[in-house]
Image (tube, rainbow, N blue to C red):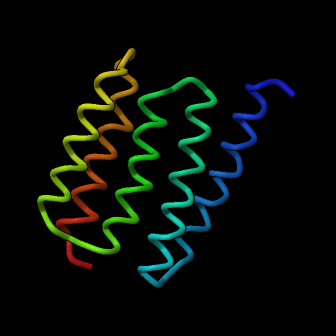
Amino acid sequence: MTAYWLAQGVGVIAFLIGITTFFNRDERRFRLQLAVYSATIGVHFFLMGAWPAGMSAELNTVRTLVSMRTRKLWVMTVFIVLTLVLGLAKLQHAMELLPIIGTLASTWRCFAVKD
């Protein structure tokens, strides 16, 4: 099995986890499954060589778990700065901005929007 097919297999697993995430009505279970999805899709991106997307997904994992414990704005700011610094440092193509933008939006949602 080549690395490409391994990466695609991990991507399919992540896709299935992602779809089933939205079946959860409990906020805590939703966030836990979202963290599992983010970790899995991050592995997929790393295997595909898309480092900014992989970094963004793994940072999403940590951010989602941390946001279950605190909603402090300074913590949100730390994750926004980390996203920008780590994501833009390895940026090679304009398309790689999309997961960074998505990470910024979801970070704001996790910390600033009340459930």
What is the x, y in percent for residue 76? 19, 57
Numbered circles on residues, count: 0
What is the x, y in percent for residue 66? 34, 65
Q: Residue furthest top?
A: 92
Q: Residue placed at 12% from the left, 58% from the top? A: 74
**Figure check: 84 above or below 58:** above
Q: Residue furthest left?
A: 74
Classify the position of the C terminus by image quarter: bottom left
Q: Residue furthest right?
A: 1
Q: Nearer the viewer, residue 19 or 73?
A: 73
**Figure check: 28 above or below 45:** below
Q: Nearer the viewer, residue 44 or 113?
A: 44
Side (left or right) of 4 relative to 25: right
Q: Nearer the viewer, residue 51 or 95?
A: 51
Q: Residue placed at 36% from the left, 34% from the top? A: 98
What is the x, y in percent for residue 111? 22, 65
**Figure check: 102 above or below 31:** above
Classify the position of the N terminus by image quarter: top right
Tell me where residue 82 sits by quadrant. Answer: top left
Q: Residue placed at 46% from the left, 84% from the top? A: 26
Q: Residue placed at 24% from the left, 31% from the top? A: 85
Side (left or right) of 4 relative to 88: right
